[in-house]
Image (cartoon, rainbow, N blue to C red):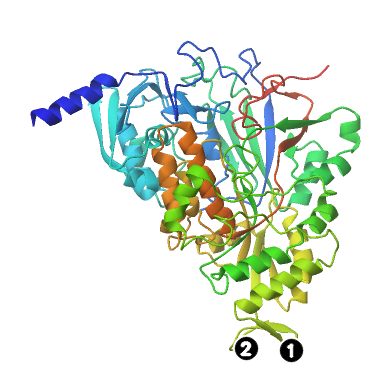
């Protein structure tokens, strides 16, 4: 007993309350920092910004599985114990918590609440609220929040304003993830079912913005709380500058863009480089009322493309997936739709130090992968690159390779159709929804469908509304669908949620491809337990090889720069851009309204 007491004392003695925490090393900003480096602490307050969403909504609770809330709510109307700096790979600073404390091994983390922290109704944030939030969101909330709760051994108060979370496994990232969970008011839900998701049950938060009004499927209006408790915090100086943020809903992307041209929307993100050059020359731009801004970034490419659902045959056969990748004529499609201006994603972490390197795996990366060599697909150890076409419409060389792969998988063309040994024709369904991010997806699939016809494959393109799409995606009711996974410079536990085996049978997970790979999970574990940045990078490069050579996604363009067309009155700190570039933590968080003369 004396030994365990001495160990506990030693761990506590080595831990000290700090103003922030980083995944590796120390946070970049000192305890007395004035503001985030990419924020303007002198930014004026006032004005409003109007953004547009395609589709509708039937919930205003972003923390549960039921319903479809506006995606922006969980970022704008709720806070956590710690807040993010988007100018560092992964560092957090005190927000609701004034300090964070953890031992060298990060077996536990302790937070001390700020005495001034308040909910939007003026009531104080208590340790009881925090513990209830972790437990309720972790057990009754959306699956994205449940993985952390499963890794908590004990959560308990340690003082009037402090609590400690002890973890049940070794994972250095857990201390940071614990600081990022939403904090809600316990008393609001005493006689209500948190998971039920009635529209009127809007969770009470602590953030600068609150939901002021809404019209179902038309708009949601958030207003800045004049009594917001944290307005003088360094983390908040120069942020949340608009008096009002209005989210308008439109039936499709074309209508939304016309609304933007007419001045009904304040800004529009454009993901097609060709359209950026071609279509953004309307009168409001020529008059200087709308400005085009390009925001560079240093983050990984992530993965954008058409994911194949391996829960369904024949997509459970990697040779079929490989054939479908060969049949996708990216070079021709890219030239047709974007003028060849947008480069292709080459791996999940491409465009960063975390991405797999060309050629065979070597050194630490090879050592990590070798125990799984019998599971790995061709290319993981030897080296892999995506197939390239000659840029012509017919793509003959890659189609011949695709047919050979299909023949090895037991398929052959009979009566003009590709059929298996039982004579069943290969027919696939690609599920699409209307969304600004994937406005090119339908055009890509139209071209792709004609290429697959030459192989004897029928591709049924189904475009459905957001509500239907969300339900079918939750149930994995598709063969292919469009997928976008943004990846950070410090990937961690979310990788289990994206690619982990627990998502194969769990409805609503982010593992759309149904990936079940012991090698991938081992690489993620290496990432999470790495004690140095170098070991972390090697583990991530190894994971990138497993993911890319798994041939789960037909990759399309990477977005190396953010393109935002916006009203001239919307300003941002142009000389201090964050390394993560554009995103919800950039626009609208650090922008401001400044009328032009």
Residue at point 71%, 70% (across, down)? 401
Question: Few, some or many C-alpha atoms within 10 Å of disc 1 (few <14, some 14-19, many ≥20)?
Answer: few
Q: Reply above or below: 408 against 203.
A: below
- The total of numbered circles placed on residues is 2
Q: Reply above or below: 185 against 410.
A: above
Residue 45 appears at what percent x and percent y?
64, 18
Between 97 and 195, the one nearer to me in the picture = 97
Quadrant of res 11: top left
Residue 389 appears at what percent x and percent y?
78, 60
Helix, strand or loop under label 1: loop
- In this view of the protein, can residue 97 be seen by the observer? yes
Residue 523 appears at what percent x and percent y?
45, 48
**What separation in Å lies between label 1 and label 2 (alpha carbons)?**
10 Å
Name the residue furthest left. Answer: 1
- In the rendered structure, the answer to whether residue 210 lies left or right of residue 278 reads left
Between 63 and 490, the one nearer to me in the picture = 490
Helix, strand or loop under label 2: loop
Please give the residue where the numbered disc 1 appears in the rendered image.
415
């Amino acid at each position: 007993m004396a030994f365990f007491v001495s160990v506990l004392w030693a761990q506590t003695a080595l831990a000290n309350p700090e103003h922030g925490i980083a995944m590796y090393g120390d946070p970049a900003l000192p305890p007395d920092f004035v503001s985030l480096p990419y924020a303007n602490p002198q930014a004026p307050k006032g004005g409003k910004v109007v953004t547009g969403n395609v589709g509708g909504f039937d919930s205003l609770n972003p923390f549960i599985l039921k319903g479809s809330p506006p995606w922006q709510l969980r970022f704008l109307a709720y806070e956590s114990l710690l807040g993010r700096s988007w100018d560092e790979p992964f560092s957090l600073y005190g927000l609701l918590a004034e300090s964070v404390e953890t031992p060298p091994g990060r077996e536990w983390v302790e937070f001390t609440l700020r005495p001034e922290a308040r909910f939007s109704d003026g009531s104080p944030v208590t340790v009881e609220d925090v513990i209830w939030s972790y437990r309720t969101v972790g057990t009754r909330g959306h699956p994205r929040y449940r993985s952390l709760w499963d890794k908590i051994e004990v959560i308990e108060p340690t003082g009037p304003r402090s609590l400690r979370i002890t973890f049940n496994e070794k994972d250095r990232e857990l201390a940071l993830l614990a600081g990022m969970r939403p904090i809600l008011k316990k008393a609001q839900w005493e006689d209500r079912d948190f998971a039920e998701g009635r529209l009127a049950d809007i969770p009470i938060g602590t953030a600068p913005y609150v939901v002021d009004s809404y019209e179902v499927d038309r708009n949601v209006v958030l207003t800045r709380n004049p009594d917001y408790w944290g307005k003088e915090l360094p983390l908040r100086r120069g942020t949340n500058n608009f008096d009002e943020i209005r989210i308008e809903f439109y039936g499709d992307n074309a209508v939304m863009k016309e609304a933007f041209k007419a001045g009904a929307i304040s800004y529009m993100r454009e993901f097609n480089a060709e359209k950026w050059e071609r279509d953004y020359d309307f009168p409001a731009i020529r008059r200087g009322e709308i400005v085009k801004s390009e925001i560079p970034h240093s983050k990984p490419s992530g993965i954008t493309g058409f994911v194949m659902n391996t829960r369904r045959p024949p997509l459970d056969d990697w040779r079929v997936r490989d054939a479908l990748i060969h049949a996708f004529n990216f070079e021709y499609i890219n030239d047709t739709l974007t003028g060849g201006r947008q480069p292709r994603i080459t791996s999940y972490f491409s465009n960063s130090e975390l991405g797999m390197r060309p050629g065979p795996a070597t050194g630490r990366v090879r050592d990590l992968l070798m125990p799984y060599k019998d599971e790995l697909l061709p290319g993981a150890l030897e080296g892999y690159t995506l197939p390239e076409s000659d840029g012509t419409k017919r793509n003959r060389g890659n189609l011949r390779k695709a047919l050979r792969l299909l023949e090895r998988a037991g398929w052959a063309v009979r009566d003009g159709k590709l059929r298996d040994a039982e004579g069943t024709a290969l027919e696939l369904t690609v599920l699409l929804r209307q969304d600004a991010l994937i406005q090119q997806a339908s055009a890509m699939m139209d071209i792709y469908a004609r290429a697959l016809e030459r192989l004897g494959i029928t591709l049924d393109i189904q475009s459905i509304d957001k509500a239907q799409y969300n339900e079918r995606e939750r149930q994995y009711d598709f063969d292919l669908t469009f997928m976008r996974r943004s990846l950070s410079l410090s990937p961690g536990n979310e990788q289990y949620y994206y690619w982990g085996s627990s998502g194969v049978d769990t409805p609503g997970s982010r593992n759309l491809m149904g990936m079940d790979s012991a090698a991938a999970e081992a690489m993620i574990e290496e990432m999470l337990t790495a004690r140095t940045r170098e070991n972390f990078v090697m583990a991530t490069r190894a994971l990138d090889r497993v993911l890319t050579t798994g041939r789960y996604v037909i990759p399309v363009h990477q977005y190396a720069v953010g393109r935002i067309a916006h009203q001239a009155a919307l300003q941002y700190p142009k000389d201090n851009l964050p390394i993560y570039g554009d995103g919800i933590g950039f626009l609208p968080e650090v922008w401001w309204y400044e009328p032009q003369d």
